[in-house]
Image (cartoon, grey):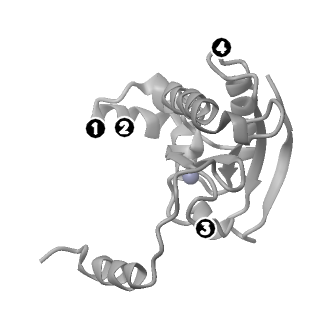
Amino acid sequence: MTRMAPLLARNEQFAANYTPGPLGPPTEQMVIVSCLDHRVDPAITLRLQLGDAPVIRNAGGRVTQAVIDDISFLAYLAEQLFGAQVEGDRLFEVAVIHHTQCGTGLLADPGFRHQVAEATGLAEAALGASAVADPHITVKADVEHLLAAPSLSPKVSVSGHVYDIATGHLTPTVDARYP
Ligand SMILES: [Zn+2]
């Protein structure tokens, strides 16, 4: 018996009314970067539909090198596949979303960080770098980090937002800007 059983049943219901869509540019011309926390799923909080926007999620919603690589690849794909369909020199906007009460905030505590490093073998410095203690500060830093990435397409803009777990509200904190 698998714990997937109830989810597989939900999938049966989903597939019963499903119509596949063609491969095309994301309807909203957005890419979302978000924390993997199960309380902040952008499909729910932003009411995304299938085909609306690719979502990249990791601990904290941090702009890591892996995230930069994915966005660079998505921009290349978008240019190659749909370049003619997008207006002017815009491919998509990346919205970086950090949130309050983030579990990675615990990593701001050196004692806890040391404990995690000991137990998992992960590098203490990398753990410290992924901490979201104040989402308003880290989201600004990550927007700047992404905008400064040499591989970022000049046709991709970046904005920053903070999601409040207590209210369900998403607040824009950094205006969209091109590199
Ligand atoms: Zn989080």
Q: Given contact means CB atoms under 8 Å apart, are the residues at marks 4 and 1 in contact?
A: no
Q: Residue at x 45, y 84 (%)?
A: 17
Confirm if mark 4 falls within 8 A of ligand 1: no
Q: CA distance from mark 4 to mark 1?
A: 35 Å
Dot 3 alpha-carbon crowd within 10 angstroms: few under 14, some 14 to 19, many 20 or more: few
Q: Which secondary structure, mark 2?
A: helix
Apparent side of residue 54 relative to residue 45 in the rendered image (left or right): left
Label 2, on which residue?
115
Q: Earlier in the sequence, mark 3 or mark 1?
A: 3
Q: What type is the residue that disc 3 sits on?
A: Gln
Q: Residue at x 71, y 69 (%)?
A: 166
Label 3, on which residue?
49
Above or below — where is 55 with respect to 89?
Answer: below
Judge depth for marks 3 and 2 and give the one in front. Answer: 3
Q: Which secondary structure, mark 3?
A: loop
Judge depth for marks 3 and 4 and give the one in front. Answer: 3
Q: Earlier in the sequence, mark 4 or mark 2?
A: 2
Q: Which mark is residue 56?
A: none
Q: CA distance from mark 3 to mark 4?
A: 31 Å
User: What is the x, y in percent for residue 167?
Assistant: 75, 71
Label 4, on which residue?
150
Q: Which mark is residue 119?
A: 1
Q: Earlier in the sequence, mark 4 or mark 1?
A: 1
Q: Which secondary structure, mark 4?
A: loop
User: What is the x, y in percent for residue 62?
Assistant: 58, 37
Q: What type is the residue that disc 2 sits on?
A: Gln
